Image (cartoon, rainbow, N blue to C red):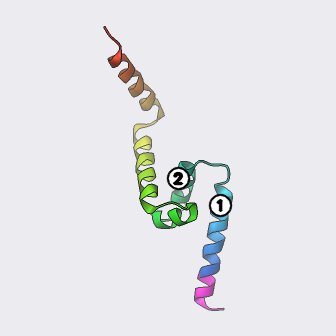
Amino acid sequence: MKADDVVDKLEVLIRLTAIGLCADKSQKEKIQILDSAGLPPKQIAEMLGTTPNTVSVALAGLRKERKIGPRDRKAKSKETLDDQQPS
């Protein structure tokens, strides 16, 4: 068996495993799982039938969410609502 054949078979196995991990998930969750598995945006896009740009934008949004954190996000949205209420 040639090295190229082994690589092709490994790529198929990776795709099948990724699909199994991502069943019943939103696209954003799928992107997060595949990214955490070490796949580059281009490969993630190919697996999900989207563009590398879409994957990169989703990953940037996920990084921003992680940086802010869920508690901070709730506090920030409450502050925004308080600012919009008339005094």
Q: Quadrant of the N terminus?
A: bottom right
Give coordinates of residue 37: x percent, y percent: 55, 61
Residue 14 quadrant: bottom right
Give coordinates of residue 55: x percent, y percent: 46, 57
Q: Quadrant of the C terminus?
A: top left
Residue at the spot x=63%, y=49% of the render?
A: 25
Q: Examine the structure image and report whether residue 29 is included in the region drawn in magenta.
A: no
Kindly identify which residue carries mark 2: 32
Vertical placement of 12 versus 80: above or below? Answer: below
In the image, taking residue 38 as reference, residue 87 lies left or right, namely left
Residue 19's disc is: 1
Dot 2: within a 10 Å radius of its alpha carbon, few (fewer than 14), some, or many (20 or more) residues?
some
The region drawn magenta spans: 1-7
Dominant secondary structure (helix, strand or loop) of the stretch shown in magenta: helix
Give coordinates of residue 4: x percent, y percent: 58, 87
Judging depth in this view, the residue of 18 and 71 nearest the camera is: 18
Q: CA distance from mark 1 to mark 2?
A: 13 Å
Secondary structure beneath label 2: helix
Is residue 38 in view from this perspective?
no
Q: Name the residue type under label 1.
A: Ile
Judging depth in this view, the residue of 10 and 49 nearest the camera is: 49
